[in-house]
Image: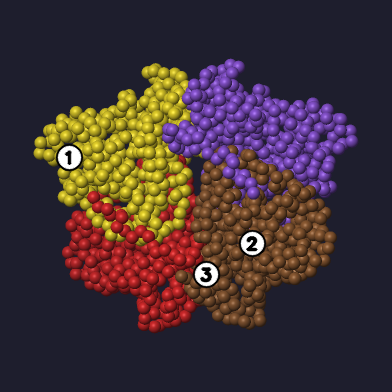
Chain colours: A red, B yellow, C purple, D brown
């Protein structure tokens, strides 16, 4: 038997002041901050699962989920995490041994491809940058070269949580169309759905994948797939079907449990209902705009800290248009990113996201998604700045001051 | 597009008194009553998922789960419901197109088989009763006939939630052994794990499947598979592997997320931790004993109501030794079971389980699992009795009085 | 320094089975069961206390409280328990050294009088029974004899929590009127407001006192006084005013805090709002009717257990019309009430109210108020019956069976 | 009938962006932020109030409360707000018509005196500043002049919540001693107990008053009085006793309810237990040090914004040594404080304290007490800075940058 969990690092270093004694703030790029209303909604006894109010909640969720992805297509709720939604997307549409083209741009699309490969698909990765977006031209070239149309789907992420790059999905769609290729366009929007514009139907996305714990402000445990008619048609001929994930019984429903292929995820359904209510109360487009302002304030802070020096802090994604509005990877130049994260956590109760990739001491990540407003974000940035001072880092100018300026300018 | 959810029955009939105004009691056979401690444990902000306290919680859960199934084997937590655990068990151990033998005894083993078939296995059902246990002799006969050893696994339930039958797992193991057959014995213990004796290693079970929402007193959303060395060896040659469920990355763990193949189900991990603490505080064997007393009190109530009359109420499983300690299916004779359930819910705030199978007006089910003690169970039985009076049903004698007698006799 | 708390009995005897492992049920006559909705409403961060939504909540509460006492008079919320409301009633209306007449009927009116005496009033107790109601004729006689009108107020309880007697307030009003006496009629309705009929204005009550933790289903911590014009006029000449309790600044309000004479009891205001919503959703008169059915089922159970034997169980109040609908004191005859309470708590998780008065081993109390429905009450009665069996008590017939019959007959 | 609540301003102005959509942050000087642990502790069903675990909680609280005030004296818990604790202090120790000397320094000591006067004491106010501390020399002079020792007590606040001044209690004690005056020294520490040094016994304080909702991180609803032997001796001859508040039955306790003179404030006792645990985990002196760092960062921010300009922002209390560590009143110079508060609340979800006193448009207050750490406080300061930008205010330099510097320097 393995002793797997015990080998994991479980504790953080000890603190020597008590300044952190207050509400601990976790600013990792997901799970995001769960609103009190959403947590409270989970605080309920188990209801009847065959009929009654829970069935009404389910109905309302399936009616509302397409609005979040901006589609007339079909939504599926899978009990599972983002990896489960990846699986549902692939298992329901692909054929064993046929090819999918994974568009590399950071890390997560490639991992999706690895999972698909293990499940029986032939996976080809179109090489890309670890810190930049997919090149639509390269996509078009590769698809043009696929003369026998062996590629059945193109897999890409909207935002890569590792690099914080944001891909130009409409441009990728145009590339596919220019190549006159019939492949399905499957987009992983896990990291930023409801944080930045995403228009499934208008952009020509065939399958969208998301999960609860980022912009949807719900604890991890459920995930989502949206499929348009082209994807549902692909399901008809798919031969990699897996019972748990299968769409057929989830579409032809005459008992409530079929929506979830078994017992429904009751607590999460209550939570999601509350979270979607919050988004609709704000207005989805307002939510996008809020995230944009908050993201710009983060970038202003990083730019100010960096001060244009070559060994200063900088945003991991150089081109502003390619940056996600939900997460920012920060390169720390000569500053030890691990020590910075530790001092923020130990001294001030702020948890930053560790960088994913080789250079863990030279980058960290800030999640700025979901239930987030100026006091929360400026507190994060101010604490990072305190940490930089504490480490004796040279900064260009005050980042939190710059961020406060961006936010103040956005007030009505 | 389908309009699937809207066709479901969502509302119950209206009430005309307000006697139900109090704590609504749901006595369906799962999800069971979630303890306040467990619900409270879910009321927490999201932590760092890479290191820190959450990793400690994970480690403790993987250390404790084998104790619940009484095994030295490996435990897996899958984000999903019981159907997901079914899938994990089959996908990790079976080979495409090879055979599994499903032992019918009620409904759920057969549904498991249907899911396995859709996923690529050749499924054979050994016919059994809808209201009785598996016949070990028939199992032995069938396996002896499998001279070329094409059957790779035997699938059976410990308790069938529909019929409330309890199978004699050790006898089935002996049947397999008598036939000298190498098939894996895979047991679905979803409906009653931690409610009645289950000894995975001692009984020779190779794979056990369970879920959170029954005896484990945790909301639905995570499920469990335990595998012994023989099952892990089968995984080595399995060819139906599905990425999301795959054991390999879950066993060879150097990052916390691998335990869950992606983002961990944070709220449920906290909940499960609290629930396991409660079971260990009570003592697992004491938990089994408590369920036995409560089950006997239910049977005493049904017997009293029935009064031995042919058209009276009776337990769905005639043989006491074959009854589950977690759920009881009650046949209602000349009483309209649907009206009885409606009057209990509408007038008194008690939700009973509807019968699964053709005869929904002639049976109902009482869940008596998990977080349950005499005031809760006697309240359920007393309300059913009030409902019987209300419908003008002829009863032999007071069932709740008989149940109170059984429980009083069990007091120390 | 005293070591006061440490001398108190803090632990109950240990249990030797684990049947109690489920939801512990506390059936004492207050604090009553707090609904989940009410507890959840308290789970909120602190708001602005000067303006905004909290002020709206306050406004709505002051608008709704008179409906609960059925008055056009003024309502006051005092942060405190029932004793604080007693104090507010007396301090705002009485004059130092003048007389109040306390109508004895059980225990609590006398204790109210003791508190008033310590605060400076001359208190006379009109002797009454410890297990019976006030005799209106005796009240009339005493007031007729008060020729110089020295008595400024008559203090009486609606329900005495100790004896479970219920007084005939309209008859007491008629007695005062027949004596043509100007004394204020001040009624302590703490134990049963919102559980049984109470019509402040119609019955001619001048001051009503209540608290949150009984029929109003809110944790203890706030209490209430209602005053009509006659009482408010008495305030004008009162000379025992105490700053904290004083009505003047609470009536002439231009800042929110004045309603509470300082910082508002935020959590309790949220809780009360939810509890009043629940009462209005049910309909106050429906709430009264529900309590009547539940009370009758308790009495039926006690009568059945007693079986008419002289040493059997019996209701503490012989006359049905004089019994409260919120609490029942049970005399246990030859049964040891202390052992019965202990066995119910230790073995089954049911806490009964101990008898107040000399004979703690020969009586106990059942609270049946507030958030209570048939499953909860029948569970209580069934468990008491199990306890009686366990102690080898002779009972006439099954009490829980009799109660289930009463409840079943009340179903629509 | 009055229509008192309806005349209150209940709503804030509407927002026109949605940047505020996140966790609303209330930075008023109390009620402070309630920790999640404390709120969760209130989420419990009502227990037995006569014996069992609740009695243990009570015992532990009475054992621990003296540690918070640093005294060997007796602690009392009163269900009520700070005004109730004021009342308990005065009613238990004073004599009707005798004199107390109130030391003016801001607003709240004077209000305490007004309450005492209404309750029957002769109150003399020693005039002081609205924005400065008590002058100990003036106290000594006044007491020396009291040759017949008519003054029975001196009332003073540790921190005045309105002005944010902090008095030098040891110096006031020395003044009393220098005058060889026997008056009791009664200190209202409501606004900052557990936030800044307070040593009841060492400093010679006879009676201390506090409440739950500031440094003690518990929702409003309970308050505290500590009394030393001299104060308890005064109780013996006091003649203004009020039953509800009376110490006698609270000291001579043989039943649990006597500690609270009636039903205990159950939810708040659980909450306070958790809050005290948090303070002891941190260490009370560490808590004081944390508040000092946070307070210095606030002052640094205000100083930076002000930039030394005469019409710029400034701390309301000029002398650093006289500033409270729990609250800061900020004078806004030429900036409209009301508009600043409105823009922070409407645009960013930050609620600031309004100034108390005539000049509401020229001052606001920041509470920085209790459950507070750098991310929370820097978020507050950053948002104020954004608000200042939004209003086009001229600021000296970035306040949040200055605060981050102070905090970074304090990291270990």
For the question of whether residue D69 can be seen, the reply is yes
Secondary structure under the numbered disc 3 in the rendered image: helix
The residue at 22%/41% (across/down) is B206
Mark 3 or 2: the one toward you: 2
Circles 1, 2 touching at the beta carbon (< 8 Å): no
10 Å neighbourhood of mark 1: few (<14), some, or many (≥20)? many
Pinpoint residue D353: horizontal percent, then vertical percent. Answer: 63, 65
Distance of label 3 from label 2 (alpha carbons): 35 Å
10 Å neighbourhood of mark 3: few (<14), some, or many (≥20)? many
Q: Is residue A195 left or right of residue D212?
A: left
Pinpoint residue A137: horizontal percent, then vertical percent. Answer: 27, 73
The residue at 68%/26% (across/down) is C131
Give the chain letter at badge 3.
D
Mark 1 or 3: the one toward you: 3
10 Å neighbourhood of mark 2: few (<14), some, or many (≥20)? few
- The residue tagged 2 is D202
- The residue tagged 3 is D378
Is residue A163 shown above or below C219?
Answer: below
- The residue tagged 1 is B183
Give the chain letter at badge 2.
D
Is residue C241 shown above or below D14?
Answer: above
């Amino acid at each position: 038997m393995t002793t797997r969990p015990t080998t994991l690092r479980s504790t953080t270093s000890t603190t020597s002041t008590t300044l952190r004694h207050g509400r601990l703030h976790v600013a990792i790029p997901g799970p995001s901050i769960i609103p009190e209303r959403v947590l409270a909604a989970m605080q309920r006894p188990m209801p009847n699962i065959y009929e009654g109010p829970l069935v009404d909640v389910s109905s309302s969720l399936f009616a509302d989920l397409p609005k979040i992805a901006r589609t007339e297509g079909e939504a599926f709720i899978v009990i599972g995490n983002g990896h489960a939604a990846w699986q549902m997307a692939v298992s329901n549409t692909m054929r064993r041994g046929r090819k999918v083209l994974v568009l590399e741009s950071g890390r997560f699309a490639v991992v999706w491809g690895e999972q698909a490969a293990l499940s029986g698909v032939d996976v080809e990765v179109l090489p890309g940058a670890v810190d930049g977006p997919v090149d639509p031209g390269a996509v078009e070239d590769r698809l043009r070269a696929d003369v026998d149309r062996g590629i059945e789907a193109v897999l890409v992420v909207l935002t890569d949580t590792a690099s914080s790059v944001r891909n130009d999905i409409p441009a990728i769609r145009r590339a596919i169309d220019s190549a006159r290729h019939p492949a399905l366009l499957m987009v992983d929007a896990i990291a930023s759905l409801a944080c930045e514009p995403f228009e499934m139907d208008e952009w020509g996305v065939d399958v969208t994948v998301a999960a609860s714990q980022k912009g949807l402000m719900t604890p991890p445990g459920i995930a989502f797939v949206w499929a348009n008619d082209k994807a549902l048609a692909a399901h008809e001929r798919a031969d990699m079907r897996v019972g748990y994930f299968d769409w057929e019984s989830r579409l032809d429903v005459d008992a409530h449990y079929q929506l979830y292929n078994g017992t429904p995820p009751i607590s999460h359904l209550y939570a999601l209902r509350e979270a979607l209510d919050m988004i609709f109360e704000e207005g989805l487009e307002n939510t996008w705009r809020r995230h944009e302002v908050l993201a710009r304030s983060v970038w202003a802070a990083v730019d100010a800290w960096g001060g244009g020096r070559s060994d200063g802090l900088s945003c991991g994604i150089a081109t502003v248009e390619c940056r996600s509005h939900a997460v920012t990877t920060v390169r720390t130049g000569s500053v030890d990113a691990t020590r910075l994260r530790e001092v923020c956590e130990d001294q001030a109760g702020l948890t930053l996201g560790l960088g994913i990739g080789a250079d863990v001491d030279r980058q960290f990540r800030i999640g700025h998604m979901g239930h987030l407003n100026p006091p929360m974000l400026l507190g994060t940035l101010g604490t990072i700045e305190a940490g930089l001072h504490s480490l004796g880092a040279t900064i260009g100018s005050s980042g939190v001051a710059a961020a406060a300026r961006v936010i103040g300018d956005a007030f009505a």
